[in-house]
Amino acid sequence: MIGGVAAGMSFAARARRLSEEVEITILERGSDISFANCGLPFHIGGEIKSRDVLAQHTPESFRNLFNLDVRTEHNAVQIDRKNKRVLVANRSSASQEWLSYDKLMLAPGARPTVPIIPGVHDPAVFTLRTLGDMDRIIAASGSGKRVIVVGGGYIGIELIEQLHKKGLEVTLVQLHTHLLPQFDSHVVLPLQAELDRHGIKAWYANYLTSIEREGDELHGHLSTGEVLTADFVIFSIGVRPESELARDAGLVLAHTGHVVVNEFMQTSDPDIYAAGDVVQTRKRHFGQPIAISLAGPASRQARVAADHIFLDHLARPYPGDIGTSIVRFFDMVAAVTGWTEGALIESRRSYETVTVHENHHSGFYPGAELLTLKLLWEPETGMILGAQVTGREGVDKRIDVLATAVIGKMTIDDLCHLELAYTPPFGIVRDVINIAGFAATSIRDGLVQVVYDVPEDPHTQFLDVRPRPLASKYPLEGAINIPLSSLRQNLDALDKNRSVTVVCQLGKTSYFAARVLTQNGFDAVSFAGGVRGFKGGAKGIVPRSAPIQESGKEFPGLLPDNL
Ligand code: FAD
């Protein structure tokens, strides 16, 4: 086995459970095995206090537990497929030896990407993958220091939060126009608002072109010309598969450099298996190639490989990935599963989408927090393709239910009647997932038409159905305010010969109002997502790209959950 962390150790442990006879040798280039890399950012910030909990295993403990020959500081440098052997360099003794195999497992993972720019090799420029990397960042991050974090993906934003909480002055440089490119842009607006709330400067659509040292300071030159000054820089701009060994051995690689495997994690050489960050698998729905850098898939793929070697016909194929993931950023949580709208557009697949809001537990029970759920489904079948959820509480539960729904090929009709546990402290009578099902089926059944843009056509009437105090405090330019409660009595105020776009705070009341209007002969559409998507209450802003103005929490009256 090459690589002794997530995929590697999962493989080894499963292999040993399946065979007491087999000889298992693990080659790990680093000095640690099976450490919790997902926990590294949290120890940097002190949220995980003890370093020891991240590295609970040693070669000895694995030897005792699983009878494994674990060789740390051993680098696999060549695979000789013809003679079924691997050349190993012992980094401690600087010696080399050939080790024979019957089956070879590749779990070398992926290394952090670093751009080729001047100054990138400065000792105060870091990446985060190993415990050693973590120690170096901790040593550099005294309170009051300035740091540039390059990359606003999962690891980048976890680092930003931890370093900010430690008292550092953090600046983000992000190539994309938004945080977390794994999400649709408008979904992560609440997380971007967290950056602003904590006074963290973010440079979007930007990258470092060079890093220059001047005494104790580093100057990071931005692509837009500005210069940022910091004590150190961390790159978290993604990872590249460590597939050089596989490539040199002639195994088939994807154009991304990932090792191509079949459904039993066999490479193009049936005696060589691979799993984890180094491989390319298939998407569960529609089978497109996908490379996922996540711990769960790595561990489960490795188990499939071990089963295929030792269980023969009992081995079950790896079903593919959907990319379920979750991240916390200060008080906000964002999670995604399956296809995003961006990915669907890119692969030219037809889809429908709706965004709904609901409290994570009953509004009348203390501590209710608003959840936002974006659902995507296939128009022809209603099959759920993906979902994204943000909020302060309860995001993890919803995304896991939705991941199960995606994997189970459930439909929007299934979501309507998903029976989820409810008592006020834990849920709500009609969960946000049910609401998403109701909204989606209402759209499918033609009961409501939703739009995502504010009407530009002057012929269209723009109707705001929020309660009067709210509408007066946060007026919408060009909108007529008739609260839903008085709409039926005031239909005469609207012109039946002109279409109506109805807006409310969260997109639910506008749907109710659109139903009233269409049944009274109006051509009415509901503005998806409500005022939450508007910028500063101004008309004409495309809500999908606009920051959030108000949290629905401030207007609890608009969030009836006791219907
Ligand atoms: P790795 O865990 O990278 O292990 C590969 C090992 O192989 C390395 O130790 C390397 O030294 C060794 N190796 C490589 N080449 C050789 C060679 N030639 N000879 C010998 N040894 C070699 N995932 C999540 O799902 N949730 C999270 O919250 C999360 N947070 C993360 C936070 C951080 C800071 C990092 C770095 C990753 C995080 N991940 C997270 C991703 C997750 O850790 C990886 O997807 C997972 O570890 C991949 O497992 P792997 O075994 O393929 O590779």
Image (spheres, rainbow, N blue to C red):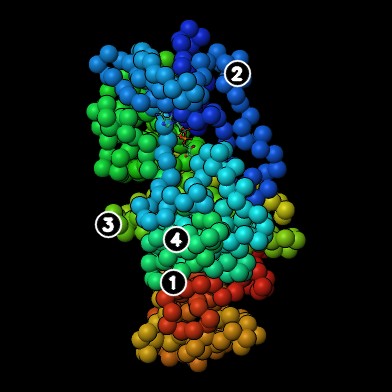
Residue at left offset 34%, top offset 34%: 243
Q: Specify which label sits upstream in the sequence, 3 or 4.
A: 4
Residues at marks 2 and 4, CA–CA distance in whole angstroms: 44 Å
Residue 188 appears in view: no
Q: Specify which label sits upstream in the sequence, 2 or 4.
A: 2
Q: How crowded is mark 4: few (under 14 residues within 10 Å), some or many (20 or more)?
A: some
- Mark 4 secondary-structure assignment: strand
Residues at marks 1 and 4, CA–CA distance in whole angstroms: 13 Å
- Mark 3 secondary-structure assignment: loop
Disc 4: which residue: 212
Disc 3: which residue: 348
User: For residue 142, what is the image quadrant?
Assistant: bottom right
- Mark 2 secondary-structure assignment: helix
Disc 1: which residue: 226
Q: What residue type is labelled 3?
A: Arg
Disc 2: which residue: 60
Query: Which sits in the foreground, 362 or 63?
Result: 63
Residue at left offset 33%, top offset 56%: 344
Q: Do the residues labelled 3 and 4 touch (CB within 8 Å)?
A: no
- Mark 1 secondary-structure assignment: loop
Front of the two marks 3 and 2? 2
Q: Residues within 10 Å of mark 1 (few under 14, many from 20)?
A: few
Residue found at the very far top of the displayed protein: 21
Q: x, y percentage for residue 325? A: 50, 47
User: For residue 54, what is the image quadrant?
Assistant: top right
Front of the two marks 3 and 4? 4
Residue at left offset 64%, top offset 45%: 43
